[in-house]
């Protein structure tokens, strides 16, 4: 049984839409496990988004 591994393209840019989708999924998980509240949503989402963006767009 062969598993398909995702193709890695280090030179392919990551779209802003993809960054938002990934950030949203992480935020949803944090909400589900009780680590994120409405009071801290804005700051937490901003931190997650910018951390992911900085990570995937490193030169």
Image: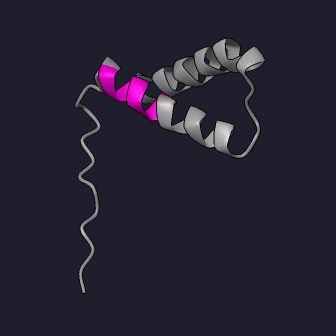
Left or right position of 6 against 32: left
Main structural element of the magenta stretch: helix, strand or loop? helix
Q: Nearer the viewer, residue 49 or 32?
A: 32
Colour scheme employed for the rendering of this structure: one colour
Looking at the image, residue 32 sits to the left or right of residue 12; the answer is right
32 is within the stretch colored magenta: no
Image position of 31 (left or right of 53): right
Q: In the image, residue 20 lies at what x, y percent?
A: 41, 23
Q: Name the quadrant of the C terminus.
A: top left
Q: Residue at x 27, y 48 (%)?
A: 8
Q: Residue furthest bottom?
A: 1
Q: Above or below — where is 57 with respect to 7?
A: above
Image quarter where the N terminus lies is bottom left
Q: Residue at x 72, y 46 (%)?
A: 33
**Depth check, front residue: 10 or 5:** 5
In magenta segment, residue 21: yes
Residue 46 drawn at (x, y percent): 60, 14
Image point (39%, 30%), residue name: 21
Residue 5 pos. (x, y %): 28, 63
| Number of marks in the rendered image | 0
The answer to which of 30 and 13 lies nearer the viewer is 30
Residue at 60 percent across and 20 percent down: it is 45
Q: Report the magenta residues as a range.
A: 17-23
> In this rendering, would 43 be left or right of 20?
right
């Amino acid at each position: 049984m062969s598993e398909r591994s995702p193709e890695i393209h280090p030179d392919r840019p990551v779209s802003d839409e993809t960054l938002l989708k990934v950030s949203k999924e992480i935020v949803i998980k944090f909400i589900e496990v009780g680590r994120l509240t409405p009071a801290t949503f804005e700051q937490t989402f901003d931190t997650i988004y910018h951390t992911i963006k900085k990570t995937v767009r490193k030169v």
